[in-house]
Image (spheres, rainbow, N blue to C red):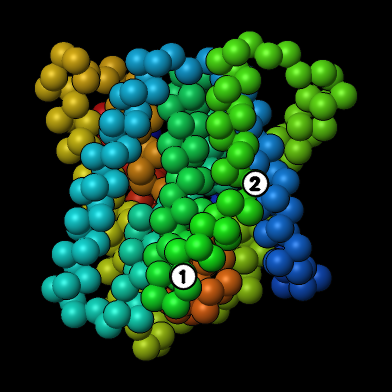
Amino acid sequence: MTIFLSILWNNVIPLSVMIALGITLHRVFSLDIKTLSKLNFYLFSPAVIFNLLYTTDISGNVLLKVLLFFFLFMLLLYAAVETAIRLRGTPPSLRGAMRNSVLFYNSANYGIPLNQLAFAANPYTLSVQVLIMMMQALIPNTYGIYNVNSHRLQARDIVRTILGLPVIYAIPLGLLLHALHVRIPEPITTPIGYLANAFIGTALITLGVQLGSMKLTFRHPKMKDVLLSVGLRLVAAPLLALAVVWLLRTNSFTYVDGLMAKALIVSSAVPTSLSSVLLAVEYDNEPEFASQVVLFSTALSILTVTAVIYFLHI
């Protein structure tokens, strides 16, 4: 119990405090969530992804194992949510939003701070989380946009939308410049550093502002679907991640060490990403449902994430 409370106090409560500040600021000043979202989307998020990929040493071995884990994990997670959708008889209009709410998780503005707190800013586990964040940045901005638009937009228009997203270019550019050991001039690296350093605080405040604009209600007409998505995201996801890690550890070629295994499982336990809400709002695809999933999953993650870290410790 002491370990559980210690993890809650040192790892999860600090994130909750920042989110609570965002909620409070929004309630007092009615902050513009669209402006904050654009700052995160077009400046802070691409900057932190580029900066981490450019400055973090990631071996080819780590890269391959993390990508293999991510592919298997997402495949199992997709199968789980698709099975739930079919058994539940979810209407077609809700299926895309439900898939997004489970598959897109907050690996950046929740996952990065959590990783740094849970593993004492270990550069090795941070590199694992950076790779997960990289993939989670790509999926909502590619598959996610396709998922909510495939029934009403032509493929050409979807591709044009995807190519207009800055993170699409930040990821390969950061990896390429790091691999080629290209030295970026200080007048450029300094602003990038400022933007990257502003990411965590601003992202958590933005998450709080977004949650502060939502109304927590148990009378939502699709509450059963909301709770189903939350259960898949917070409970089923880390269990599936544990299964994938166990599978990888049974083979000497794909074997992941204990520290990487823990980092991968923790990375899978975070709540639903705001990107699912942003996509739902932007393309008018069940925005209220998406907002409720983010709200409930973020609130309940205080307990579930603490439990995951606790069980990994023991």
Secondary structure of the residue carrying tag 2 is loop
- Does residue 264 appear in this view? yes
Q: Earlier in the sequence, mark 2 or mark 1?
A: 1
- Horizontally, is 237 left or right of 26 in the view? left
Image spot of residue 132 (x, y percent): 43, 36
Secondary structure of the residue carrying tag 1 is loop
Location of mark 1 (residue)? 154
> Does 146 appear above or below 1?
below
Question: Which residue corresponds to the image point at 20% horizontal and 58% vertical from the top-left?
Answer: 80
Image spot of residue 140 (x, y percent): 47, 54
Question: Which residue corresponds to the image point at 84% horizontal and 19% vertical from the top-left?
Answer: 186
The residue positioned farthest toward the right in the image shown: 187
Residue type, mark 2 in image: Pro
- Horizontally, is 71 left or right of 59 in the view? left
Residue type, mark 1 in image: Gln
Residue 11 versus residue 251: which sits nearer the camera?
A: 251
Q: Which-is-in-front pick, marks 2 and 1?
A: 1
Quadrant of the rendering where the N terminus is positioned? top left
Give neighbour class at mark 1: few <14, some 14-19, many 20+ (Cα, 10 Å): few
Residue 137 versus residue 205: which sits nearer the camera?
A: 137
Location of mark 2 (residue)? 166
Image spot of residue 78 (x, y percent): 25, 55
Residue 299 versus residue 132: which sits nearer the camera?
A: 132
Quadrant of the rendering where the C terminus is positioned? top left
Q: CA distance from mark 2 to mark 1?
A: 22 Å
